[in-house]
Image (cartoon, rainbow, N blue to C red):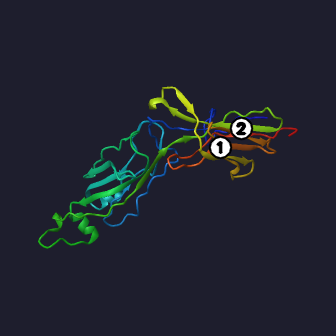
Amino acid sequence: MRRPFSTLGGRFVLPLISILASGALAFNLSADSRTTAPAAATAGSCTLTVPSKISITGNRDVPAVSLGADCAAAGVIDARWNTKSPDGALQHQFVSRFNKPALPWNLFDTDGLGVWTWQPAGATTGGDVTLAIQGSTASPGRTAAAEAISVPQNTPTTDIRFASEAYWNPANLTKPCVLNLPAGGLKHDINGDPASSVQWVPYAGARGSFQQLQRGSTTWTSISGATLPSTGKLEINIPWPKVTTHYRFVLYDAPTIWGSISNLYTWDPSPGC
């Protein structure tokens, strides 16, 4: 007997396994976004905290970027980073003066994918605070209060890729004691407009696996690996479970696409199977 689906890992009713992509895209920090932690604060350091992972799901986002507390502790009054895409092109400049918030980082659908590197472009102090912290001495003929000091900066990165959404189709129960689980497809929003219609187009080559979690276990196991064919759709036939079992489909990370996990199906044993 089929019972209500679990809400773990995905949405309640979803039509297809899909990867969200479009020529006009927007961006969103995914739920499992990792954040680059500042390096251990040392005397006279200045660190920048940025999202280490961004998933594209729309046409614009403003990811959070902030200075570490070590910058103020070192007396930094001017901190700058240049953000560059993999081809070396300058994409954004972070500038904070006198500990005031920097201009926001506006990320658009025209920006490139890949690992962006936040390269240090200078962090300087008013002089006396840093000299005291670092135990430095002023150059001959200059006073400590006038000696501006450059302090070390970190070099964080942000990996920007398309988002994906893995879906199950409703199971087919046309064969006795056999679950037929179909899936597949590629979804994208027209012109990045959430109110517009959604198109489904085949996506060949996306890799993933069908997985199960049996009652009493804490480990998901793979039933079968899967690669979406040219139709963008595939299915799997599995025996009816002997114990209550959760099923899901997992899409793996790809060079330009972050992976995802589908909604769950939960099935109880059936008499006679």
Q: Amino acid at mark 1?
A: Phe
**Residue 64: x, y in percent?**
39, 46
Is 135 positioned to the left or the right of 161 in the image? left
Q: Is residue 180 above or below residue 39?
A: above
Q: Residues within 10 Å of mark 1 (few under 14, many from 20)?
A: many
* x, y percent for residue 201: 57, 33
Q: In the displayed structure, would residue 120 be above or below residue 8?
A: below
* 226 and 196: which is toward the camera: 226
Q: Is residue 156 above or below residue 176?
A: below
Which dot marks residue 181? 2
- Local secondary structure at mark 2: strand
On the question of residue 54 being in view, the answer is no
Looking at the rendered structure, the number of numbered marks drawn on it comes to: 2
Give the residue drawn at x 38%, y 52%: 87
Decide if residue 146 is in sight here.
yes
Q: Quick one: label 2, few (<14), some, or many (20+) residues within 10 Å?
A: many
The answer to which of 166 and 104 lies nearer the viewer is: 166
Q: Quadrant of residue 152?
A: bottom left
Q: Please state, as top left, top right, bottom left or bottom right, where the N terminus lies in the image.
A: top right
Earlier in the chain: of badge 1 and badge 2, it is 2
Residue 217 in percent (x, y) is at 73, 52
Left/right of residue 21 with respect to residue 78 in the rendered view: right
Q: Where does label 1 land, which residue?
A: 249
Q: Cβ–Cβ below 8 Å for labels 1 and 2?
A: yes
Check disc 2 and give the amino acid type.
Leu
